[in-house]
Image (cartoon, rainbow, N blue to C red):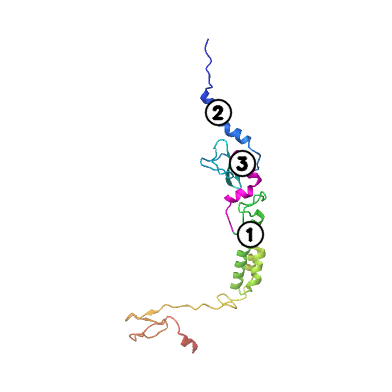
């Protein structure tokens, strides 16, 4: 008679116990709305500040951050979570994270609705500025066309683009001044002295020069 081979060994049983222990520990934890994971080696309890067991204790994922806890301290954390979570919360001048925020809230404490509103205002400012600049280049009043682009965004900007210009191409719009242009000096071919571009004679050697622009005196005459 052949003996039946035993595939189950004491070593395998111990290994299965260690694998099942985290599942048993997690199932016996108090019910929380947060996901529970294993602590990392070297973690300390957020409530009691004691070292944690990576097999029996837990770390809760609260608003994207790990909160290591001794399994007996989970209830204490849930009762006063604002107090303990504030230690892991970044301090900002505008927004603070709120544990009671709705599910659609971002980590910074700002809801998706406010985020979309801010994005709309930013887009409106961009199209408003583009509309005002285009209106100035066409000789139109910039402020009314800025608000057209601000409230209507891309549609307002397209409207300003299609409006006819009231000034000729190259003409300076009303209310603006032309920036004076600076011309480079002209070197004398005989001595190399740098002369004004409107000079007809070299100041150094009196050699003849070819002016590259008309002088302001000649324009006044």
Mark 2–mark 3 CB contact (< 8 Å) = no
Q: Quadrant of residue 69?
A: top right
Q: Which residues are magenta?
A: 70-92
Label whose residue precedes the other's in the sequence (1 or 2): 2
**Which residue occupies the foreground of this view, 210 or 186?**
186
> Is the residue 71 above or below the residue 216 in the image?
above
Distance, label 3 to label 1, CA atoms, is 40 Å
Report if residue 102 lies within the magenta region: no
Residue 155 locus on image (x, y percent): 65, 63
Distance, label 2 to label 3, CA atoms, is 27 Å
Question: Which of label 3 and label 1 is nearer to you?
Answer: 3
Label whose residue precedes the other's in the sequence (2 or 3): 2
Residue 72 locus on image (x, y percent): 61, 39
Residue carrying label 3: 73
Mark 1–mark 2 CB contact (< 8 Å) = no
Question: Which of label 2 and label 3 is nearer to you?
Answer: 3
Residue carrying label 2: 16
Report if residue 72 lies within the magenta region: yes
Residue carrying label 1: 118
């Amino acid at each position: 008679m052949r003996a039946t081979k035993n595939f189950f060994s004491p070593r395998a049983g111990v290994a299965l116990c260690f694998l099942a222990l985290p599942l048993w520990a997690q199932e016996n934890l108090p019910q929380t709305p947060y996901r529970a994971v294993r602590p990392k080696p070297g973690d300390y309890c957020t409530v009691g500040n004691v070292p944690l067991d990576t097999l029996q204790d837990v770390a809760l994922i609260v608003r994207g951050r790990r909160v290591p806890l001794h399994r007996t301290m989970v209830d204490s954390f849930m009762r006063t979570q604002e107090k303990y979570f504030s230690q892991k919360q970044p301090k900002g001048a505008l927004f603070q994270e709120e544990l009671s925020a709705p599910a659609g809230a971002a980590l910074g404490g700002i809801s998706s609705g406010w985020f979309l509103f801010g994005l709309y205002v930013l887009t409106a400012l961009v199209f408003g500025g583009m509309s005002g600049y285009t209106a100035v280049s066409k000789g139109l009043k910039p402020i009314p066309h800025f608000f057209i682009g601000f409230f209507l965004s891309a549609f307002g900007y397209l409207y300003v683009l299609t409006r006819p210009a009231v000034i000729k191409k190259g003409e300076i719009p009303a209310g603006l001044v032309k920036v004076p242009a600076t011309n480079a000096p002209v070197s004398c071919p005989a001595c190399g002295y740098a002369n004004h571009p409107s000079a007809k004679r070299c100041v150094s050697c009196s050699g003849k020069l070819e002016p590259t622009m008309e002088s302001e005196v000649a324009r006044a005459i």
